[in-house]
Amino acid sequence: MKTLAFVAASLLALPAYAADFGSLLNKAQEAVNTYGQDAAGVVTEKSVDEERDIGRQWAETLLGAAPLWNNDKAQRYVNEVGLWLALHSERPELAWRFGVLDSPNVNAFATPGGYVFVTRGLLARMRSEAELAGVLSHEIAHVVRKHHLAAVRKAQGMSLGGKLLKQFAIKDKGNEQVNERLLGGLKEVMSRGLDKGDEYEADRMGVVIAARAGYDPYGLPGVLQTLQALGAQDSTLALMFATHPAPEARLEALDKAMGSSLDAYAAQPQLQARFQKSVGRP
Ligand SMILES: [Zn+2]
């Protein structure tokens, strides 16, 4: 694995024709600089704990629907890969947690504050650690950009302002209603999906995070090609297809954004053997 300094230095050396990725990297830097205030002023330095509280409750709801896969080795491995990737994101300081859900369906989820889940069914469709890295990085990008909170705001037309989050954090009896609204928001987001533009953004950021972390950035496109080949008729993909743009559209958008700007990073490892050894037969 290459060192962070090496990867950062080589990303700075991206050629000029990588215009899209240059601006994406700049945007990421802006996010670091303004960390503590999103566009709506919702998440301040102080309310990271509140964001995490919401995320934990959402994660518990998800785990109620599908528990963690009973395979310590695979869980540890996915956590190690995920933490390494998160360290290369714009919010390395979050208390990131990764888990494999015991579900045959093909999907991946994240909740605010740094909880990321991938299903056993999706792991079974992957061929390498670079592909796992691509999927986890896509989810990490959703958390970094707070896409879920934006989706809840949009879905419910509610203002998740600082005041509401503060009330939520106090957790007295009067806040049950607020909790219900937030959890109701989760259900809606999980069934309807995030903003399509946010999905494309997470794809673009995902390949950059994977490249920064030392992986072949074509892992995510590889998974999207697999999903494309399986097709919308495969019932294990139903929720994934209902909540995401079609793999064809995502591949096309990613291809347009990437061009050949990340080709130099394609020589970075895919780690097929380590992946197979660590996840066994999901
Ligand atoms: Zn997504």
Image (spheres, rainbow, N blue to C red):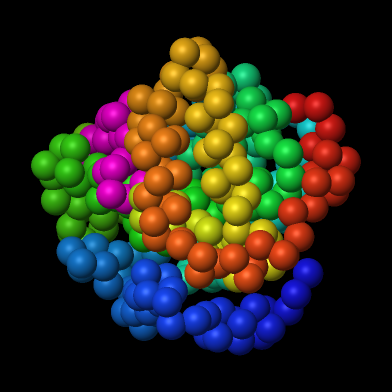
Toward which corner of the image does residue 17 lie, by quadrant?
Answer: bottom left
Q: Is residue 162 above or below residue 251?
A: below
Does residue 223 belong to the magenta stretch? no
Q: Position of residue 220 (x, y in %)?
A: 56, 48
Residue 175 location in percent, x, y? 25, 42
Q: Is residue 197 above or below residue 74?
A: below
| Pick the front one: 116 or 270 | 270
Residue found 68% across the figure and 52% down from its top: 130
Q: Give the residue at x 50% y 81%.
A: 15
Looking at the picture, tell me which residue is in the foreground, 214 or 180.
Answer: 214
Query: Is residue 179 shown in magenta?
Result: yes
Q: Is residue 146 above or below residue 240?
A: below
**Magenta residues (range):** 178-199
Percent of width and height locating residue 74: 78, 39
Residue 242 seen from this side: yes
User: How many marks overall?
Assistant: 0
Instruction: From the top left corner, tell me how far across and down residue 83 is, in percent.
Output: 65, 60
Question: Can you see residue 96?
Answer: no
**Residue drawn at x 81%, y 27% as measured from the top left:** 281
Is 86 on the left-hand or right-hand side of 187? right
